[in-house]
Image (cartoon, rainbow, N blue to C red):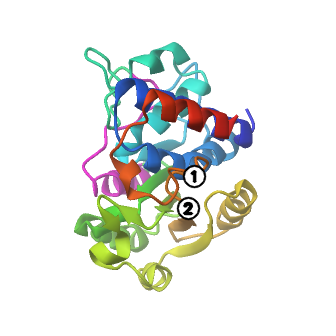
């Protein structure tokens, strides 16, 4: 499936899931849908028939609160039947609000406690190196998550061990919880910070499939350095009444809002 088609399906499925399950974080899902689509359409090596294949690449959704986006991605690719998505966030379902790997093929680890995904991914990347594997590790993080000190230890660790099989994507939508990232705890200048930690850094448009693809391809030539992509995005991207509004970090779409959003994306 091409990335543009997949990104549209992710958005539509996630909107429906969050509305039916009355779950949060639709804004966060919409902001990273294009990153998920490009990675799974063009870069991540996966096997629907054998999800635990040793030759697979590993993907870790560190911003686990956007779990509906990952569930939708994997369902659209055939890991599970898309009808399962209708049970999201409901009693008895294994599709919890935050990412849970239990019973869901294609998900490596359960996430949601921010600051855990990258350290786990460092361990996976180093283990693959020790096994002389050609597999890569892809990590999707939120920008608000960079407030967690465990991530900065992991940034140091990754460059020290030259984990060039580690690709990290920052969903830089500039909003977290109740206000902007810069009002909460200023992150800038991010590029120079990551460079000083010994990483290869690229800043790009996180909604441009071409920009994402070109930069990932270019970074593959870089050896002995982990790679990080600062993906400038818009929270709620694709649904104008949700865009750049922190309200949609928590609110679930009503039936009427779901209908309006679906029309905008159709």
Q: Are marks 2 and 1 in contact (CB under 8 Å)?
A: yes
For image coordinates 33% across by 61% down, the residue present is 145
In the rendered view, tell whether residue 213 sits above or below residue 259. below
Quarter of the image with the C terminus is top right
Label 2 crowd (10 A; few <14 / some 14-19 / many >=20): many
Q: Determine the CA span between mark 2 and mark 1.
A: 8 Å
**Residue 168 location (% of width, % of height):** 49, 60
Which of labels 2 and 1 is toward the front? 1
- Using the image, tell me which numbered label, if any, was put on residue 237: 1
| Boundaries of the magenta span | 104-127
| Most foreground residue, 247 or 235 | 247
Question: Can you say whether 6 is above or below 120 in the image?
Answer: above
Task: Please give the name of the residue rendered at 56% of the width and 64% of the height, measured from the top-left corner.
Answer: 231
Residue 233, disc: 2
Quadrant of residue 252 in the image? Answer: top left
In the rendered image, the quadrant that contains the N terminus is: top right
| Residue that lies at the very extreme toward the front in this rendered image | 256
Local SS, label 1: loop
Foreground residue among 185 and 61: 185
- Residue 104 seen in this snapshot: yes
Q: Position of residue 113 (x, y in %)?
A: 24, 49
In the rendered image of this protein, does residue 176 appear above or below residue 188?
above
- Circle 1 Cα neighbour tier, 10 Å, few/some/many (<14 / 14–19 / ≥20): many
Q: Is residue 6 magenta?
A: no
In percent of width and height, residue 236 lies at 51, 51
> Residue 41's x, y, as percent?
68, 40
């Amino acid at each position: 499936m091409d990335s543009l088609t997949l990104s549209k399906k992710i958005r539509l499925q996630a909107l429906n899931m969050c509305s039916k399950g009355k779950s949060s974080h639709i804004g966060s899902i919409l902001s990273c849908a294009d990153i998920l689509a490009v990675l799974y359409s063009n870069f991540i090596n996966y096997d629907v028939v054998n999800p635990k294949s040793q030759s697979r690449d590993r993907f870790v959704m560190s911003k686990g609160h956007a779990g509906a986006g990952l569930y939708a991605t994997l369902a659209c690719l055939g890991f599970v039947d898309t009808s399962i998505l209708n049970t999201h966030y409901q009693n008895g379902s294994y599709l919890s609000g935050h990412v849970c790997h239990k019973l869901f093929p294609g998900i490596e680890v359960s996430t949601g406690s921010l600051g855990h995904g990258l350290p786990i991914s460092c361990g996976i990347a180093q283990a693959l190196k020790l096994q002389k594997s050609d597999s890569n590790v892809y990590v999707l993080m939120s920008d608000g998550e960079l407030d967690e000190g465990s991530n900065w230890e992991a940034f140091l660790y990754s460059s020290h061990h030259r984990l060039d099989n580690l690709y990290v994507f920052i969903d830089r939508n500039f909003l977290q919880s109740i206000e902007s990232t810069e009002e909460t705890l200023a992150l800038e200048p991010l590029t120079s910070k990551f460079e000083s930690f010994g990483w290869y850094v690229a800043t790009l448009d996180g909604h441009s499939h071409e920009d994402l693809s070109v930069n990932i391809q270019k970074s593959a030539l870089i050896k002995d350095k982990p790679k990080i992509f600062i993906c400038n995005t818009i929270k709620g991207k694709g649904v104008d009444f949700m865009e750049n509004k922190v309200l949609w970090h928590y609110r679930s779409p009503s039936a009427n809002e779901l209908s309006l959003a679906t029309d905008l994306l159709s």
